[in-house]
Every structure is written in structure tokens, then in C-alpha cells.
Image (tube, rainbow, N blue to C red):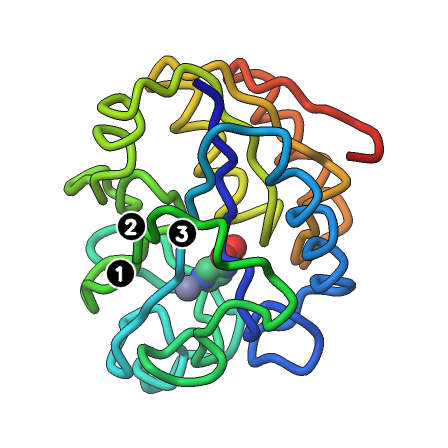
Amino acid sequence: MKALILVDIQNDFCPGGALAVADGDAVVAVANRLMSTVDLVVATQDWHPANHGSFASNNPGRKLFDLGDLGGLPQVMWPDHCVQWTGGAQFHPGLDTKRITRVFPKGTDATIDSYSGFFDNGKRKATGLGDWLKAMGVTEVLICGLATDYCVKATAIDAAGLGFTTRLMLDGCRGVGMQANHIPDALAAMQAAGVQIINGKA
Ligand code: VGL
Ligand code: ZN
């Protein structure tokens, strides 16, 4: 069984959103095309309470994009984004959501961030995605979405670590790229973790 994992294809990560990734909405068409190549489609959704500790606004004295800490881990201070029940947290309107069998919310605990769709950043709690994929008989996953250097990277590395044959569909991903090396470094880290980087049109 082959599954497609759609990572955080949400309005706030697309142009006009609170944490917009350049060209982020370009992943939507690729994601929709990839859906017909798999047995099962699943999505992660960044889903923060308004008091989430990753927001600079909840850390007096910290500036946007500074490195602070949260739950004992280094933490980028993000703009408020993907706040539960807001439009920014909704999937991009062009995404073919009727193909999605299940949505796994993440980042719901204000005291720790969760880039991976499988675990929080401290690997303290699982979201249930890994067990669910295994229960569905999935052995192979394709990954696309946002953002290459944060949630896509963490999700792909955890997928490979859990034993899934893992393919990163590069054309269906866009990154934040705060520094020029961040996206290439993320791809190298995924590759080192056993993720196959598929470079080409879907
Ligand atoms: C993400 C930063 C903060 C992502 C989520 O989806 O890559 N990045 N929250
Ligand atoms: Zn977030």
C-alpha cells in the first residue's frame, strides 16, 4: 500500500498568509495530481492554539524569527499562524480535500512545537499517523507540501525512521529558506536519513 502525505498545505503558508512560503501555492496542483497515483491520501494540519509558545507574540522581548526556546528545545519565533478555526489554518481552497481519508492535526500543545506529522519536536508524543499508516497496511509514502525546510523535512525523516519507503516529491514542495543553505541542507538531511528525493514533474 502506497500513501501520499500532504504536509500543511494551508492558507497561512501560501502567498497572502501569515507565514507565507514563496510560491507555496504551486504545490497544490502537484498534490492533486499525485493523489491519483496512490492508494491512500492523508494530510497533516498545523493547528495551533492562539497561546502557542512558538509565536513571537507569546514571548515578550523576542523578535520575529529569532531563535528562542520552547519546552527545553531551540525554537524559531514564528508569526502567529495556523491558529485553530481561523481561515489561515484551513487547507488551500484548490486542494482536492475530498480525496483525503484522514487529517492529523499537530502543534496543538502550546508548550511544544511539532514540525513532523508523526511526533512533536521532542518526540514526547506521537500524533497517531505512524500507527494508523501501519494499520492501513502502508509500506511506502510519497511526501509533498510545506515547508521543505521545516515540516516536510521532519515528516520525511520520521517516515523513513519508522521504516516506510519514503519519497520526497520535490516539485510538490516549497521551503521557507530563511538562509540560502536551509533548503539544500534540508534535502541533504532527508537523503542522509534514507529519504529518496524525486526530482521531476509529477
Ligand atoms: C511550519 C513553521 C512553523 C511548516 C509550521 O509547516 O513547515 N513551519 N509551523
Ligand atoms: Zn506552526
At mark 3, the secondary structure is strand
Name the mark nearer the viewer: 3 or 2.
Answer: 3
Instruction: Report the quarter where the C terminus lies.
Output: top right
For ligand 2, give the image quadrant. Answer: bottom left
The amino acid type of the residue labelled 2 equals Leu
Circle 2 residues within 10 Å: few <14, some 14–19, many ≥20: few
Q: Are marks 2 and 1 in contact (CB under 8 Å)?
A: yes
Q: Position of residue 82 (x, y in %)?
A: 42, 74
Give the labeled residue for mark 1: 70
Residue 12 position, x and y percent, is 55, 74
SS at circle 2: strand
**Which quadrant holds the N terminus?**
top left
Mark sitting earlier along the chain (3/2): 3
- Pick the residue in front: 48 or 52: 48
Q: Nearer the viewer, residue 170 or 157?
A: 170
Whether residue 164 sits left or right of residue 137 in the image: it is right
> CA gap, disc 1 to disc 3?
22 Å
Pick whichever of labels 1 and 3 is earlier in the sequence: 3
Residue 44 - label? 3
Distance of label 2 from label 1 (alpha carbons): 5 Å
Tell me which residue sits at (24%, 42%) in the image. Answer: 122
**Quick check: marks 3 and 2 in contact, CB under 8 Å?**
no
Looking at the image, which residue is at 20% across and 56% down? 71
The residue identified by callout 2 is: 73
Q: Residue at x 29, y 60 (%)?
A: 107
Amino acid type indicated by mark 3: Thr
